[in-house]
Image: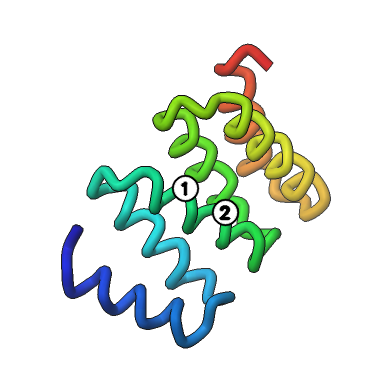
Amino acid sequence: MAGNRAEILKSMVEQDPANAFGRYGLAMEYMNSGDLESAAEQFAKLTEYNPAYAAGYFHGGQTLEKLGRIEDAKDLYRRGIEVTAASGDAHARSELQGALASLGA
């Protein structure tokens, strides 16, 4: 993980746990460095604090898939579909539906 960038993001999240930008960035840093457990944890917190943050559902689901947690990924995609349907975000909803369909759901 890029040390300085990760430290800045961690600091942002420590100061404001609901900071969507910091939380998403930290989750992506973990994902890109291969620390999938930490990434999944951060995506879960992101959607908890910011339930309308559509990218958290998509990338969180992908992370869960990589961890072999397929049922958890399906559940996260379904929650994201509900959120994006309610917000009218057709593009994100379509991506989440495609991800869910690729898992045979």
Q: Is residue 63 above or below residue 53?
A: above
Closer-to-camera residue (32/95): 32
Q: Residue at x 63, y 12 (%)?
A: 104
Please state, as top left, top right, bottom left or bottom right, where the C terminus lies in the image. top right
Residue in the image at 47% along x and 48% along y: 40
Residue 71 picture location, percent across and down: 62, 26
SS class, disc 1:
helix
User: Residue 91's image quarter?
Assistant: top right
Callout 1 amino acid: Ala
Q: Is residue 2 visible?
A: yes
Where residue 75 sits: x, y (%)? 68, 34
Residue 98 visible? The answer is: no
Contact between labelled residues 1 and 2, with CB atoms less than 8 Å apart: yes
Q: Residue furthest top?
A: 104
Residue on which disc 1 sits: 40
- The residue tagged with tag 2: helix, strand or loop? helix
Residue at image location 52% in from the left, 83% down from the top: 16
Density class for disc 1 (Cα within 10 Å; few <14, some 14-19, many ≥20) is many
**Would you name the residue on which mark 2 appears?**
44
